[in-house]
Image (tube, rainbow, N blue to C red):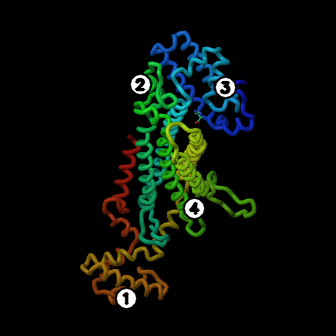
Amino acid sequence: MSKLWGGRFTKSAEEWVDEFGASISFDQELVKEDIQGSLAHVKMLKACGILPPGDAGKIIEGLHTLQEKAENGELSFSVEMEDIHLNLESMLISEIGPVGGKLHTGRSRNDQVATDMHLYLRNQTEDVLLLIKSLQKAILKQAEEHVETLIPGYTHLQRAQPISFAHHLMAYFWMLERDKQRFTESMKRINISPLGAGALAGTTFPIDREYSSELLGFEGIYENSLDAVSDRDFILEFLSNSSTLMMHLSRFSEEIILWSSQEFQFIELDDAFSTGSSIMPQKKNPDMAELIRGKTGRVYGNLTGMLTVLKGLPLAYNKDMQEDKEGMFDTVKTVIGSLKIFEGMISTMKVKTETMRKATSSDFSNATELADYLAAKGMPFREAHEVVGKLVLSCVQQGCYLADLTMEQFKEASDLFEDDIYAALNPYEAVKRRNSAGGTGFEQVKIAIGKGNTLLAE
Ligand code: ARG
């Protein structure tokens, strides 16, 4: 097979050199987008009178045939044809004859590949947004059932104050909401058309970039042809947004792993999202959560890789930029897979409310209640902190908790203590009373869930 750009060459590259330069092994992922881009391009050429309707018609028909073949998995790509663009063009020529060679009029692979990537990321971003939404739904559903389920809240992984389990879950809802905002915002920069920028300088043909952009559903065109073919910011943005999303999922994964351990026993993952051990029959491992935590690494890696590829590249297109694809495909696959798994894991997990509740009453996480109690009665908070610190110490020495202290012992520490102190120490009351905006008080949590539901209904 001779190269589509072979005219200037007297000698062909050896197979292993071709292999090194080729991207077809991975950019065949863009087959659908490449055909879509070509269809818009040829329709524009026809509308502008650059190609006679007869020729354009044949090309359009040929592209539809290729589209069908692609859908049925009937296309076989060759390394010699280097990439998806040249493979499809040579297939088109085989399909309809030399007239197929007119498709590339007024176009370069540089604006072609950029167009493909914009179309591809637009599709994938839409999918990612839907999947984030499904995960948020699963979180909301669990939250609705666990408004009054108490769990210790932690700082430094030490029990800090009791909270509503729903409140803890909802923290992830809001992280995901920001992820959605970031992906949505990035669409403005994904959804613009580089098509018609040519190799770097535009073209001598009287093309209509607005028209091909419109056909492709883009919201506008790049202002500068050099920028159009060399911009990969939109990919960086996708990789960066994906990294933040995966960071959130990995933090959630870590909590799921901790909560399902023998030490916590706060949740039990469904068998469908756990695996056993080949040697230890008792094991039920949270593999999926661990994998998502682990896969976060490759997503960060892909971002760093892309930033590094682009660093210092002169304008306009450089072959280095072919390296933008594998990391991006890998990130798309990882993010989509992780979101799907997460949704399943969250909707099927069992919450062990009794262990959680016990954990909130067999610790010192109600110590702040005592300090707040004294402060509410006029003692400066700093002093109250000191009084309660001493009570905690004496409990630790006696081997009991604050609610086990007698009224006498409380009075000894401060005569501001009254009988109602026992009610104040109750973790349920402690949670309920944290009714400040965005706090863990049950009323606040219900408000947050309501807001969440409204957002998802939009
Ligand atoms: N396979 C190439 C890429 O992915 C397509 C663009 C090639 N352009 C060129 N001038 N060699 O970047």
Name of the residue lying farthest toward the left? 378
Residue identified by numbered label 1: 409
- For badge 2, the amino acid type reads Glu
Q: Earlier in the sequence, mark 4 or mark 1?
A: 4
Badge 3, how many Cα within 10 Å: few under 14, some, many 20+? Answer: few
- Name the one closer to the observer, 53 or 70: 53
Indicate the position of residue 253 as horizontal and vertical percent values. 55, 58
- Name the one closer to the observer, 56 or 261: 56
Residue identified by numbered label 4: 257
Question: Looking at the picture, does residue 357 appear above or below residue 205?
Answer: below
Indicate the position of residue 434 as horizontal and vertical percent values. 34, 65
Residue identified by numbered label 3: 6
Image point (58%, 47%), residue name: 334
What secondary structure is found at the residue carrying circle 3?
A: helix
- What is the CA distance from the residue labelled 3 to the residue labelled 4? 57 Å
- For badge 1, the amino acid type reads Gln
Residue identified by numbered label 2: 210
- For badge 3, the amino acid type reads Gly
